[in-house]
Structure formats: C-alpha cells, structure tokens
Image: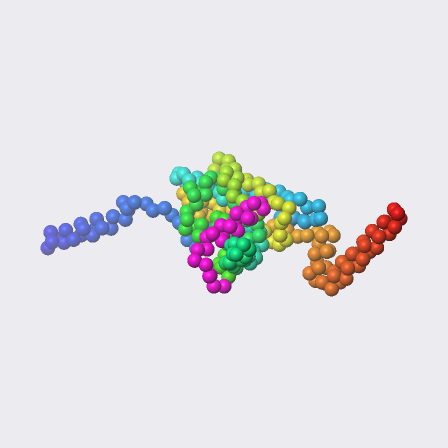
Amino acid sequence: MMRALTHPLRLALLLALVPVFAPAQEATPQPGQEPAEQIVAGLSRDNIGITTSFDGSQILIYGAIKREAPEPANDGLAVIVTLEGPLGPVTIRRKSREFGIWVNTAALGVASAPSYYAVATSGPLKDILDPKVDVQQRISIPLAMRAFSGPVQVKDTRPFTEAMVRIRERQGLYTLETGGVRLVENTLFRADFELPANLTEGDYKTRIFLLRKGKLVDQYQSAIDVRKVGLERWLYALAHEHAAIYGLLSLALAVIAGWAAAAVFRFVR
C-alpha cells in the first residue's frame, strides 16, 4: 500500500515545484499600482502672452526619472516629449485643372486636428516607439489628427492628410525633432521648443512619455496657457464679443484716416 502511494505523491511534489523553476516574466504595473520608474518634470513657463509685437517664444521642458529601486538591467530607455496646440476642424481640398480652370474636385474633413504639434525624441521614432503604443497614445504627427468628420468620399485619405502635414510643416506648426530630447545618464532630460509667431490662442498640452524597448513605462502631462494680452487682447475680445461696436469703430477709423490723408494732400498743394 505504501509503495502504491509513492509514485503519485512524488509526481504531485514535482508538479508543485514546477512554478519555482519557470522562466521569470517581465513585471507590468497593475491598475492603481505605481510604475517602477516615474517622471518628475517641470516647465520653464506655464503661460505665454501674445502681443502686437509677438514674434515667437521658447519653452523648456525638463525633468528626471524617479526610481525606488536600481535601474532595470535591460537597455532601451527612451523619452518622447510632445507639445500640442488647441484642436479644431480642418477641411482639406484637392484642386484639379478642368477645361483650363483650377477647381476643387475633392475634399476631406478632419474633425479635430491640432493647430500646433511638435514632437521631440531621444532617438529615431521608429526605433524607440512601439506602433501599438503610438496608436493608443497618438504620439506621431499623422496620428495626432482625430477622426474624419462626415462621410469619407475619397478612396484614399492619405494624400489629403499628408498634404495638410506638409503645409503645416512649412508654416512651422508641425515639427519632429529626432534627438531633441537630451537624456543624461538615463536620469535627467530636457527638451527645447521654439514656438512660431503664428500661434493660435488657447490651452497647449505637453506630454512626456517614458519608454523601455518601445513599451510605455510612465507618462506625464501638463498645460501651457497661451493668451492674447494688452491691445491685442482688447481688440480680439471686442471683435468677438461686441462685433457691432467693433464694426462701427473700424468704420470711424477709416473715415478719420481718409479725412486726415485728404487734409495732408491739400496742405501739401
């Protein structure tokens, strides 16, 4: 009887020991659990004033990677920083020459596209960012645009979105700077953004992504307030909130300027 039980007992003991020798899996943070590496960051300024003489500005985004334990042995640490302007609808039109005249022959509406979008990375985007993470977080410039508005009446949407990206790149509104994030000893980082003069007023969102081997480890988000100030703000508010008064003032200024010009010409004669 004892010999009959020996074999099943030995098998049960072996099965119980199998998980101990199983290959270790990479730990992933559970919901509500803090990641092993965290981003601690700050901005050189959290607001920008647009005046009549505004010719652009500069934003410095800096930070460090906080660790409660020694840095993981696996390589592939990367940091991506994005700066996104207010979202708005955009209609992209394609023109064709018909009977010697250039006319709009097709159009595509984008429900929400950032007025400004800049990406700075610590390495080539295709090497440090997993495509799945890119789709989930909408990090790269093509994915920063949201869903199309209304029914899509073109066979291929890529030429339209690529054309819009090219136009805004030429205007300095969409930029990708590979190596724009300087990473020091896998702990400290900084990224500098040169903002153009043709900024749209609104709330700008900055995001920082910490990745290892393309996988997202942690992310940080902050806001920058961009507003018109001084005379520029007063004229903007007057035009949008009191359109009738703004129109009358514009007409009065035009009449006064015309009368003054006529008076100067009479004096010169």
Span highlighted in magenta in the image: 150-172
Whether 85 is drawn above or below 62: the answer is below
Q: Nearer the viewer, residue 15 or 72?
A: 72
Residue 14 point in image, percent of width and height: 21, 48
Q: Is residue 82 visible?
A: no
Residue 247 point in image, percent of width and height: 74, 61
Residue 155 magenta = yes
256 sits left or right of 204 in the view: right
Q: Residue furthest top?
A: 185
Q: Nearer the viewer, residue 109 or 30?
A: 109
Residue 80 point in image, percent of width and height: 49, 44
Whether 126 is drawn above or below 105: the answer is above
Identify the image quadrant of the N terminus: bottom left
User: Disc count in the image?
Assistant: 0
Q: Is residue 252 visible?
A: yes
Q: Nearer the viewer, residue 266 or 234?
A: 266
Question: Which residue sits at x=39%, y=39%?
Answer: 74
266 sits left or right of 138 in the view: right
Q: Quadrant of residue 238?
A: bottom right
Residue 48 point in image, percent of width and height: 65, 48
46 sits left or right of 253 in the view: left
Question: Which residue sits at x=54%, y=54%?
Answer: 100
Q: Which color scheme does this rendered protein use?
A: rainbow
Residue 237 magenta = no
Question: Which residue sits at x=34%, y=46%?
Answer: 25
261 sits left or right of 233 in the view: right
Q: Nearer the viewer, residue 4 or 18?
A: 18
Question: Which residue sits at x=22%, y=50%?
Answer: 15
Whether 209 is drawn above or below 112: the answer is above
